[in-house]
Image: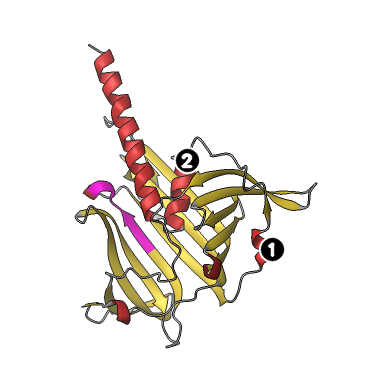
Amino acid sequence: ELTSAKQVRSGDIPTFPGDYVAKEDSLLLINQGGEEDANGNFCCNKTHLGQCEIQLQSLDGMHYVDYSNNRTRFEDVHNGITVNDYKAHKSYDIVHNETLSKDVCVKFCPLDPEETLDNLFVDPDAKDKGQTTLNGKTVEKWQWSEVILKIIRMSTTDFYADQSNASMAIPVFQTERITPFGGKQIGSENHTWTDLKAQPVDPAKFDIAGLDDCPEDPQCQQPGWQHKRIFFRQRATWAKYAVSSRRSEERRVGKECRSRW
């Protein structure tokens, strides 16, 4: 049972690791028009009018966070390697070239200039909701909302941390409810940290060929990239491409409507 919530000041936010390596996984569900059945599955009902789209995406792998040098590397067991460089403001799609025995850049997407790599984990405007139990472990719960233009709520996050060590808190789990542009919830993302080790990251993890002439991906608005932005907490970039996709969809629908008359 949670203790009473309190509004926190920036000085109340616990200290989290800067450089670390951890196993992390994320499950993203986007549900626009689907219905949940008795087994917890989301399906589109053909008998109902209107558009329906359901996306289920997962990320699962080792995350190397080099906070000291403003960069991260995520090795996903299914989706390959992503490197974020917050100095260059780019997210790189990387493959390992067996012939060269070297990592090589395939393509990149730009990061919004506002994006920074931090080790806060908890939003400065979060509320401390008190202690609770998660999978038999005592954790502290925090809650906050992401907003744009000061009033438009994009998402709400519940975050849980192990604060048994007063000198360093360890992230455990978070769930984010996605409500683009203040509308109804269209999805959620669950993120889990396991076996986190606070330690420097091997520089070899960022020894990558072809970064200077790596081409920009023309499909940076695709769901796969958007899921990564949620995973990496790249909120400004995610919002930018969400707005772009929304405008493209509005233009497309408008053309379809006009073509009927």
Q: How is the image coloured?
A: secondary structure
The secondary structure type at the circle numbered 1 is helix
Q: Which residue is mark 2?
A: 220
Rendered view: 181 above or below 196:
above
Mark 2 vs 1, N-terminal side: 1
- State the image coordinates of residue 171 (x, y, percent, origin top left): 45, 73
Q: Amino acid at mark 2?
A: Cys
10 Å crowding of disc 1: few (<14), some (14-19), many (20+): few
Task: Tell whether 68 sits left or right of 114.
Answer: right
Foreground mark, 2 or 1, reads 1
Q: Quadrant of residue 12?
A: bottom left
Start-end of magenta stretch: 175-181
Q: Is residue 111 magenta?
A: no
The tag on residue 204 is 1
For residue 186, side relative to residue 25 (left or right)? left
Asked whether 95 or 35 is in front, the reply is 95
The amino acid on which the numbered mark 1 sits, given as a three-letter code, is Ala
Residue in front for this viewpoint, 124 or 39: 124
78 versus 130 height, above or below: above
Question: Residue 248: which numbered mark, if any?
Answer: none
Residue at the outermost top position: 261
Residue nearer the viewer, 234 or 36: 234
* Mark 2, other Cα within 10 Å: few <14 / some 14–19 / many ≥20: some
Percent position of residue 212, x then y: 62, 46
